[in-house]
Amino acid sequence: MVPVKCPFCTPFADDIVARNELCYARWDRFPASKGHLLLIPFRHTPDLFSMTADERLALFALIDDCRVIIEENFRPAGYNIGFNTGAAAGQTVMHCHCHMIPRYVGDVKEPRGGIRGVVMGKQMY
């Protein structure tokens, strides 16, 4: 069952930056950095674990397409790519979506540990 106001279920055509048969990408409306994209299955499904195998393949293929778009427009030095799955992990829209966050030299004081920084005290090891 699709929630009445899911912001990802019915994207406007002009919001779609890239797409394939099963997934689409759009700019994040609250970007963590310049070029932050969200990659989203068209089918309403809550998280990575509920995606079909074909949807997962389509989403990961879309990462490659989105990398080209980001590289051409923003020239980042790296990326953080990931899913927030469940409210305890910070997921606020319960329609599966993958964050593709470009990273830039100097955008944080110490980038070592990357994604581990979501848990306080665990970034540096």
Image (tube, rainbow, N blue to C red):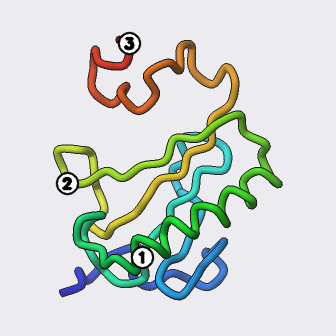
Of residues 82 and 34, the one drawn nearer to the viewer in this rendering: 82
Q: Which residue is mark 3?
A: 124
Q: Are marks 1 and 3 in contact (CB under 8 Å)?
A: no
Q: Which mark is residue 12?
A: none
Query: In the orientation shown, which residue stands out farthest toward the right?
Result: 72
Picture coordinates of residue 3, whole percent (x, y): 23, 80
The N terminus sits in image quarter:
bottom left
Of residues 48 and 108, the one drawn nearer to the viewer in this rendering: 48
Estimate how packed mark 3 is, as few (under 14), some (14 to 19) or many (20 or more) residues with alpha carbons within 10 Å.
Answer: few
What secondary structure is marked by label 1? strand
Q: Which residue is mark 1?
A: 41
Give the mark nearer the N terminus: 1 vs 2: 1
Seen in the picture, residue 3 relative to 101 is either above or below; the reply is below
The residue depicted at 63 percent of the width and 25 percent of the height is 107
Residue type marked 2: Gly
Picture coordinates of residue 19, whole percent (x, y): 60, 79
Specify whether 54 is left or right of 25: left
Residue type marked 1: Pro
Q: Are marks 1 and 2 in contact (CB under 8 Å)?
A: no
The residue depicted at 30 percent of the width and 64 percent of the height is 48
Picture coordinates of residue 29, whole percent (x, y): 53, 57
What secondary structure is marked by label 2? loop
CA gap, disc 2 and disc 3? 25 Å
Seen in the picture, residue 42 relative to 81 is either above or below; the reply is below
The residue depicted at 56 percent of the width and 69 percent of the height is 61
CA gap, disc 1 and disc 2? 17 Å
The residue depicted at 49 percent of the width and 78 percent of the height is 23
CA gap, disc 1 and disc 3? 33 Å
Q: Which mark is residue 86?
A: 2
Give the mark nearer the N terminus: 1 vs 3: 1
Specify whether 55 is left or right of 47: right
